[in-house]
Amino acid sequence: MAKQKYYAVRKGRQPGIYRTWADCQKQTSGFPGAVFKSFPSQAEAEAFLQGGISSVAPQPHSAARKNKNKLNQSIQNQIDQLRPGQAVVFVDGSFTNHDGRPRYGYGGLIFLPQQAPHQLCQGFSPDQYIDARNVAGEIRGIMAAIDYLLDQAVTTAFIYYDYQGIEAWATGAWSAKKPISQLYVNFLQERQGRINLHFCHVDSHTGVEYNEVVDRLAKKSLGL
C-alpha cells in the first residue's frame, strides 16, 4: 500500500499543507517561483512551511541537525500554544521476549495547556494481541491516552505516532483484519463524536525529542 504523503506549499496560490498531489498542483502549477515539497509526516511538512526544512536534498549532517532542532521547536511551539480543550499526545510501543517471556507495553506523554506532561507507562503479559508485538503496545497506548483526554474534557488532540497503521486504521485507509486493529477501530467508533483526532506522523529514532522519551517509557514498562 502506498505511503501517505503531506504536500507542503510554502509559496503558491494558497500556502498550506495538502494531502493529495492534485491539490498541491492546483496551488503551484503555473505559479511563478512556487516552492513546495512532499513529506512522509505532517510535522516535517509544518516545519518546512516555517522555513525549517529545505526543499533541496540530500542535506549535510549539520543541516539535518538544524532541521531536527527546527522540528522539535515547532512541536514545542504547538504545545506552548495549546488552548483549553486541546492536547498533544506522543505514544510508542515496545515488545520483548527476554528470558522466553513475551510481553508488550507502551509509553506515552500527554500535554495539556500550561501543565506538566502526564506520563503513561504500562506493560502487558501475553494475551490475544501479543502477535502484534510493539504495534499492540502503541495501540493500547493510544487508547489509554484518548480515555485520559476524555476524562479531562479534551475535545481536540494532536497525536504524534511512528507506526503508519495508527492513522491508517483510524481513517479507514487500512482494513482492520487482525484482533489488535479490530480492537482499535471498535474503540474509536465507540468514542466517535466525542473528540477530534489529528494524526501527525514522525519517524522513529530520528531525534524527535518527545518521541524518544516515549520510546524509553515503553521500554521501561517492560523493565528494559
Image (tube, rainbow, N blue to C red):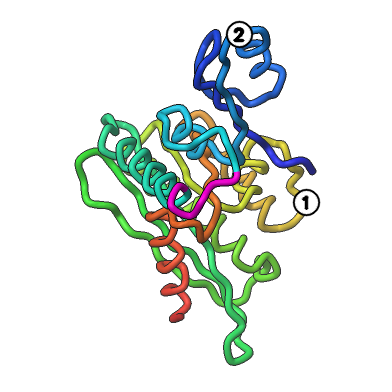
Residue occupying the point 60% across, 29% down = 37
Q: What distance separates the C-alpha of mark 1 from that of mark 2?
A: 44 Å
Residue occupying the point 64% across, 19% down = 24
Q: Quadrant of residue 109?
A: bottom left
Disc 1 marks a residue whose amino acid type is Lys
User: Is residue 61 shown in magenta?
Assistant: yes
Disc 2 marks a residue whose amino acid type is Phe
Q: Which mark is residue 31?
A: 2
Residue 59 horizontal side relative to residue 51, left or right: right
**Closer-to-camera residue (202/60):** 60
Q: Could you classify mark 2 by the number of other residues whose Cα lies within 10 Å: few (under 14), some (14-19), or many (20 or more)?
A: few
Where's residue 172, x and y in %?
70, 36
Residue occupying the point 38% across, 62% down = 213
Magenta span:
58-63
Q: Secondary structure at mark 2?
A: loop
**Closer-to-camera residue (183/139):** 139
Q: Which mark is residue 177?
A: 1
**Closer-to-camera residue (94/37):** 37
The relative height of residue 34 versus residue 166 in the rendered view (above or below) is: above
